[in-house]
Amino acid sequence: MIEKVVDPTTTEAWTALKADAARMSATSLSELFAADSSRVEALTVETAGLCADLSKNLVDEETLDHLMALARATGVAERRDAMFSGERINTSEDRRVLHVALRMEREDSVVVDGRNVVDDVHHVLDSMAEFARSVRSGAWRGATGQRITHVVNVGIGGSYLGPAMAAQALRSSANADLEVRFVANVDGADLERETRDLDPATTLVLVSSKTFTTLETMSNASLLRRWVIDALGESAPAKHFAAISTNTTAAQEFGVVPEAIFGFWDFIGGRYSMDSAIGLSTMLLVGPEGFDELLAGFRSMDSHFRSASLRQNLPILLGLLRVWYVNFLGAQSIGVMPYSSDLGRLPAYLQQLQMESNGKGVNRSGDPVSYDTGPIVWGEPGTDGQHSFYQLLHQGTHLVPLDLIGVLTPMSSNHEGHDLLIANLIAQAEALAFGRSAEALAEAGIPRDQIPFRTFPGNHPSTLLLLDELTPFTLGSLIALYEHEVFVQGVVWGIDSFDQWGVELGKELATTIAREIEDDAPLHDHDPSTAHAIERYRGIRRRWR
């Protein structure tokens, strides 16, 4: 279905924002703070367990007004409502986009083709809860009668990044005698590393693949199936495998019993699926009650996104700031720096969410865009990054807006260390924004020849995101915030944030090349560089085959 979309560059708001960018280049964050004593209060939003201080962003009230006008001109609110109501807003695939239904209350309703999909969601959640309680309690046992002590989640992309991130983030909320590990890479070293000390008799494997055909996932799952069968017998997979898939026939043929198969739907994209059955590993760790708390956090941010005014709507504000930096101030990347070891996998998760969603070069009408779209997302936990790449952030030549994320309640008993961690978080936001002038250095007695090297220009923007504590609720809220701000960007840019055709060509070619490697047949239809690489690999392969 081809859709006519608004070209944002033709709007009055876009023209006004170009003038705003020129004005902002002539001022500084120091001047913006000096001119407005209420800036922090006006640019702080608290909702759904999060406190976001946006005051260190390179905007003033006029800029914000024009960003709000851009949101209105491109139909952000209308498209948001269309998503929540189940319209087919994934236009290139003619699909609905209903990850928001995954966390709706049992009494809510979104009717699709005459069926309330919320009922279906809760049916799966109930089945997951029954299975999780069985495994956690020891009622579900392996083929030898032993309890399950380890879970291996096999998946890739959205079937891996979200659950792996959640397992680390919610370690303090985990309340089961289970350890969950993750295998994603088709490189055999990944699987060997994660299973080398495991006993098949006490291991449960979760195979996460919507179609049950994902090449990397099924390759690893097949190796694990052989590992289990060799140790425990042909019938053992029935006690040692569960499947998260819509392809129940293939899962049962693989050896998974029906009560261990959990489905989801084509209106759920992989990168939006961690609160679906893909989150079974999370439920096994924190229990059904903890998973309900996670869903409540998602739901709380959903409610804020749907009901708050544009000016106080955190996902809309954050999404519009991304557009501002990318299209008007020339930023090419966004840094996400969690000052929490438990949130260490968050940047990797957000890379997929942002870059697979908005890394598009055509709009929803199929026309090439004339402006930049999705920024590169990257990051590492603080304080590690401070001793790595912060030099560039403070004194380099690139504009890199940052999200600095802090958890105010310590996640360990080392309270002194936590004080230092939070001090560094706050200090970095201050240093990036306000820097240190040559005049201040001279007054401090710094030798004149050192001053150019020790001057910090400041004026580097950041958003300070603070969680009082890291719980399933606040994690759900934080992830929903990022889901929705990515959505806002996509609407403004007029692109389809919910397809991912860009991952397909490489997979198709890899399948062809894998057959050619296996057959050792003459090569056709490859460029010389590709053919040379294949032949080189074949030569090495003959040595170890």
Image (cartoon, rainbow, N blue to C red):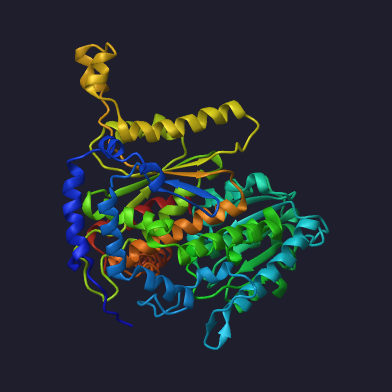
Residue 178 in view here:
yes
**Quick one: which residue is furthest to the bottom in this view?**
114
Which of the 4 quarters of the picture holds residue 436? Answer: top left
Q: Position of residue 184 (x, y in %)?
A: 52, 55
Which residue is located at x 53 percent, y 48 percent? 189
Which one is nearer the viewer's eye here, 345 or 193?
Answer: 345
In this figure, what is the number of numbered marks? 0
Up the image or down, 212 lies above or below 442; here it is below
Which residue is located at x 30 percent, y 81 percent? 2
Task: Look at the image and tell me in which quarter the N terminus lies.
Answer: bottom left
**Quick one: which residue is furthest to the front in this view?**
37
Up the image or down, 324 lies above or below 488; here it is above
Which one is nearer the viewer's eye here, 326 or 308?
Answer: 308
Q: Position of residue 139 (x, y in %)?
A: 82, 61
Which of the 4 quarters of the picture holds residue 12? Answer: bottom left
Which residue is located at x 47 percent, y 53 percent? 349
Residue 152 located left or right of residue 519:
right
Up the image or down, 184 lies above or below 497; here it is above
Which residue is located at x 25 percent, y 53 percent? 62
Which one is nearer the viewer's eye here, 324 or 502?
Answer: 324
Residue 9 located left or right of residue 471:
left
Residue 222 in view here:
no
Q: Position of residue 264 (x, y in %)?
A: 57, 73
Residue 126 located left or right of residue 163:
right
Q: Position of residue 190 (x, y in %)?
A: 54, 49
